[in-house]
Image: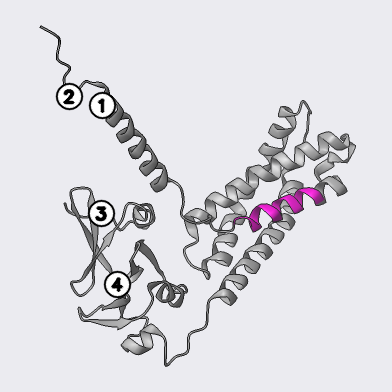
Amino acid sequence: MPAVRSLRTGPAARTAGKRGFVKRALGFAKRALPKKAPPGFPLLWVACLAAAALMIVTGGFGTGRLPLHARTLFWVVLMLWNALKWQALFAWGVRKSSDWPRIALLGTVPLNLPLPLEIPLVGALLGRNMRVMPFDVWLRAAAISVVIFAVCALVAWILLRQMRPVRADTGLLARARVGAEQLAGIEAEDHYCRIHRRDGTSALLHYRFGDALEEVAALDGAQVHRGAWVAAGAVAGAERDGRKWRLLLAGGGSVPVSATYAAEARARGWLRGRG
């Protein structure tokens, strides 16, 4: 009697399994990759490379005695490492345009403290014995930090200028008669936007969700779904249904959290609820 192949183990099943794996892998990659560039990119990296170029030319921290190729490699490695530290800080702390100067000042001391150790370490990686005076290093690092701070101020200024001005009588919040302190969240419903108030009431207006996001860009809040935005001060909790989350808003409303934006909600400490 000829053997009968199981539908679960035959070629068709194996092909379907491979397709399923590829689909899951692509879905994971789509969720893992950031939807937008991290805060400060690429201006931060340009500023750090500009600072490296200045140090290469001037021979800062006693590197003038090194050959040009060694001096170039030293400063590129050191400044890229510091750019990575600043980038991590901005990704952690910058949520809105007004955060830039505060976070830049906050990082000045802790990110510059390790420099007296980092300089000899980078020198050792290049086969160079480099000794530095900590206070001299910190003084020069303060000058470099001024450049970083200036870039941050420039970024904040550019972002604020790019925010499309909305006339007071035609903006979403004005039409809904909702002040910023009353706003709990915004949800897209087809070509409409539902504005949730913190007293539990809501209003439905014909408005593009993308335009609504631009209008609230300066407020402390975050997009948590392809069609949902919440104000930070209006999040009252969260509840979980299987693998899905919903944020509970002041006043009793709720909005969904998609996998794409869950990392932002989790970073803000919102996804701590029952479920």
Q: Is residue 112 above or below residue 20?
A: below
Q: In the rendered image, which residue does mark 3 sit on?
A: 272
Q: In terms of sequence position, does the residue under pointer 3 or pointer 2 come before the other?
A: 2
SS at badge 3 = loop
SS at badge 1 = helix
State the extent of the magenta-drawn residues as a range: 41-53
How much space separates mark 1 and mark 2, taking CA atoms?
A: 8 Å
Q: How crowded is mark 2: few (under 14 residues within 10 Å), some or many (20 or more)?
A: few
Q: Tell which of 91 and 139 is nearer to you.
A: 91
How much space separates mark 3 and mark 2, taking CA atoms?
A: 43 Å
Amino acid identity at mark 3: Arg
Q: In the rendered image, which residue does mark 2 sit on?
A: 7
Disc number for residue 190:
4
Residue 110 visible, this angle: no
How much space separates mark 1 and mark 4, taking CA atoms?
A: 40 Å
Residue displayed at 74% across by 57% down? 143
Amino acid identity at mark 2: Leu
Q: In terms of sequence position, does the residue under pointer 2 or pointer 4 come before the other?
A: 2
In the rendered image, the residue lying farthest to the left is: 1
Q: Residues within 10 Å of mark 3 (few under 14, many from 20)?
A: some
Q: Where is residue 180 in the image (x, y as percent from the top left)?
A: 37, 81
Image quadrant assignment for residue 261: bottom left
Q: In terms of sequence position, does the residue under pointer 1 or pointer 4 come before the other?
A: 1
Disc number for residue 173:
none
Residue displayed at 64% across by 46% down? 82
Q: In the rendered image, which residue does mark 1 sit on?
A: 12
Q: Do the residues labelled 3 and 2 touch (CB within 8 Å)?
A: no
Amino acid identity at mark 1: Ala
